[in-house]
Image: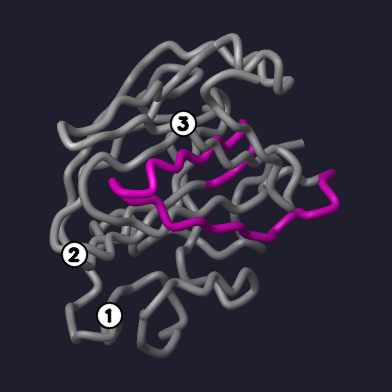
Amino acid sequence: MGQIKVTPCPIKGLYLIEPAVHGDARGYFTETYNQRDMTEAGLNMVFVQDNQSMSVKGVLRGLHFQKQYPQGKLVRVIRGSVFDVAVDLRKDSETYGQWYGVELTAENHRQFYISEGFAHGFLVLSDVAEFCYKVTDFWHPGDESGLAWNDPAIGIAWPGLQGAYPGSASAAGYTLADDTPLNLSDKDQKWPVLKEAFSFT
């Protein structure tokens, strides 16, 4: 291996990516992607698009996926901190319906690779977060779908989040530990729970 360490996560198809960071008093340098290192780790994905978003504290985006054109995603944070989550939607998987999460920050330089077949989302923990991700397929209008972020059957332990499940994906009544209200788009508050959602075969 070279400059990037690739570690499989407990759920097959998820990987923690840790690039080497070279720093001194002037700052730092790091390789954020190296195809050779990925190939040596058994990852042969081909990325077709890079995306970047900015969100404020308390924003939760997800859980998203594309049904007919599933995307693999390599995600990282270049400013602030987020808790990033993937949920296994592969119907024939031993870990179907299970989740795995990791905190990504500008300081830890960690990346999270999520293979096709997962729903993905993140919660912003810092005042502001800038989020970058590479994808293996293009965005296809009309193909996007989602999963309720708070489905009790999945039981994602979003850090610091307080509130009671209202029977839907509504953000009403949820706050972070410092009373910051949870902030979701209208669309993300309408996704179904796992038993009613799409799954990959």
In the image, which is nearer the foreground, mark 1 or mark 3? Answer: 3
Q: Secondary structure at mark 3?
A: loop
Packing grade of label 1 (10 A; few <14, some 14-19, many >=20) is some
The residue indicated by pointer 3 is: 20
Distance of mark 3 from mark 2, alpha carbons?
28 Å
**Spatial CA span between label 1 and label 3:** 32 Å
Mark 1 vs 3: CB contact within 8 A? no
Q: Find out whether residue 96 is within the magenta segment.
A: yes
Q: Residue at x 59, y 32 (%)?
A: 5
Residues 64 and 197: in front is: 64
Q: Give the camera-side residue of 197 and 14.
A: 14
Label 3 vs 2, first from the N-terminus? 3
CA–CA distance in space, label 2 to label 1? 9 Å
Image location (x, y in percent) of residue 162: 36, 87
Q: Which residue is mark 2?
A: 57
Q: Please, is residue 87 above or below residue 149 in the view?
A: above
The picture quadrant where one finds residue 109 is top left
| Residue 170 drawn at (x, y percent) | 33, 73
Question: Do callouts 2 and 1 mark residues in contact (Cβ within 8 Å)?
Answer: yes
Q: Amino acid at mark 1?
A: Leu
Residue identified by numbered label 1: 176
Residue span colored magenta: 92-119
